[in-house]
Image (cartoon, grey):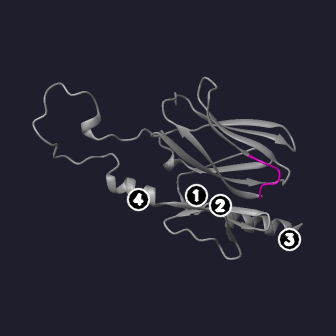
Amino acid sequence: MLKKLLLTSIAILISIPAGLSQQANAAEFENLSLTIIWDEETFYQPSGCTSYTFGYLKTDIRTIAMIRIENQYGDILGADAIYSGAPIAGRKSMIICDGKDFTNTKLVLDVRSPQNDVKSTPIVFKARETSPATTGPTTGPTTGPTTGPTTGPTVNSLEVKSQVKNIVCKKNKSTLRVSGKNPKCPSGYKVTK
């Protein structure tokens, strides 16, 4: 029993996404057999279609669950599943596109096995800052380029995001997703295609 607890603790430390474990704004939500972790600082309303990442930890290998984000009307904005064969801990991503109502959004954790349990918690998508030039319609002709700083994303920041690569690493039945400019698999893991 002690050995199992120690191995589970090590799995937690290894598999929780590095950015989430060190963030002061990390949020956590759990039910009977599953804990979900995310970084609230990365949850901006989507621009186009945006990927949102959650860390998870199962206390039972048989756990089958659905993670979804719903708005106040019950519309599902994004969802992903965790299956019984999935590793005890890992990451799940969901893609959410703009053009939807983000009023009173909530994270729903719907566990179907080993016991049925549905819980939800509010989740806030922060508003994106816009540059002064795009805040509203202009009322007259412009006389030249604006000279003030912009607060929105710049071309350079968009180029950096496009340089991020994702790979999937596998070791036995354990799978990890690694992201970065030059991602590499941890020791003992091999890149899958």
Q: Amino acid at mark 3?
A: Lys
160 sits to left or right of 63:
left
To which residue does mark 4 refer? Answer: 160
In this rendering, which labeled residue sits more in front, label 4 or label 1?
Answer: 4
Q: Earlier in the sequence, mark 4 or mark 3?
A: 3
Q: Secondary structure at mark 2?
A: loop
Foreground: disc 2 or disc 4:
4
The quarter of the picture where the N terminus appears is: bottom right
Distance from the alpha carbon under mark 1 to that under mark 2: 7 Å
Question: Could you say which disc has been placed on residue 3 in the image?
Answer: 3
Q: Is residue 104 above or below residue 18?
A: above
Describe the element under mark 1 as helix, strand or loop.
helix
Between label 4 and label 3, give the one nearer the viewer: 4
Magenta residues, start to end: 82-87
Tag 1: amino acid = Leu
Mark 4 nearby-residue class (10 Å; few <14, some 14–19, many ≥20):
few
Image marks 4 and 1: residues in contact by CB distance under 8 Å: no
Residue at 58% in and 57% down: 20
Compute the Cα span from label 2 to label 4: 24 Å
